Image (cartoon, rainbow, N blue to C red):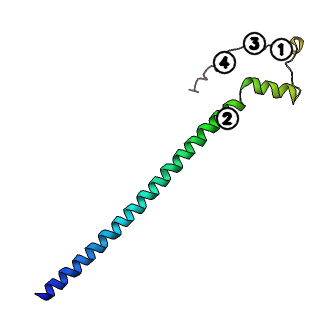
């Protein structure tokens, strides 16, 4: 009978150690999940900030100001402007297969 009790005690101790180990592992994974969620929030904030910044940098008024001031660009005069008429594309007629 004492052998059975010792065997059951050993099984009980192994199960208890396995339970503690699995709980510890689950807690570590939960902490890691929370850290990754925080990281995701930071990246989302940075992405939205960068999108706003890109919108500000690419406004038409800013581009036109830089083009005129820094690059000394200007709109062409009317005599230098040439309009090209629009011609709709028509595919060539199909070639009949040789008989």
Q: Are marks 1 and 2 in contact (CB under 8 Å)?
A: no
| Residue plotted at (42% across, 62% down) | 28
Expressed as whole percent of the image width and height from the top left, the position of residue 49 reads 62, 38
| Residue plotted at (32% across, 69% down) | 20
Instruction: Measure the alpha-carbon separation of dots 1 and 2.
Output: 37 Å
Q: Is residue 53 left or right of residue 80?
A: left
Q: Quadrant of residue 10?
A: bottom left
Q: Are marks 3 and 4 in contact (CB under 8 Å)?
A: no
Of pointers 1 and 2, the one earlier in the residue sequence: 2
Instruction: Measure the alpha-carbon separation of dots 3 and 1.
Output: 10 Å
Viewer-closest of 48 and 97: 48
Viewer-closest of 40 and 88: 40
Read off the residue under disc 4: 89
Q: Quadrant of residue 97?
A: top right
> For the residues carrying marks 3 and 4, which lies nearer the camera in this image?
3
> For the residues carrying marks 2 and 4, which lies nearer the camera in this image?
2
Instruction: Measure the alpha-carbon separation of dots 4 and 1.
Output: 21 Å
Label 2 SS:
helix
Of pointers 2 and 4, the one earlier in the residue sequence: 2
Expressed as whole percent of the image width and height from the top left, the position of residue 86 reads 72, 14
Checking the image for residue 53, the label placed there is 2
Label 1 SS:
loop
Label 3 SS:
loop
> For the residues carrying marks 4 and 1, which lies nearer the camera in this image?
1
Read off the residue under disc 3: 85
Checking the image for residue 67, the label placed there is none
Checking the image for residue 82, the label placed there is 1
| Residue plotted at (51% across, 49% down) | 38
1 in relation to 58, above or below: below
Instruction: Measure the alpha-carbon separation of dots 2 and 4.
Output: 41 Å
> For the residues carrying marks 3 and 1, which lies nearer the camera in this image?
1
């Amino acid at each position: 009978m004492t052998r059975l009790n010792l065997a059951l005690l050993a099984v009980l101790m192994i199960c208890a150690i396995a339970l503690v180990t699995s709980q510890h592992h689950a807690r570590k994974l939960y902490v890691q999940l929370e850290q990754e969620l925080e990281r995701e929030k930071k990246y989302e904030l940075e992405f939205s900030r960068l999108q706003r910044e890109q919108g500000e940098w690419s406004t038409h008024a800013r581009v036109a100001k830089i083009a005129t001031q820094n690059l000394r660009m200007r709109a062409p005069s009317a005599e230098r402007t040439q309009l090209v008429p629009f011609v709709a594309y028509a595919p060539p007629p199909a070639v009949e297969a040789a008989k």
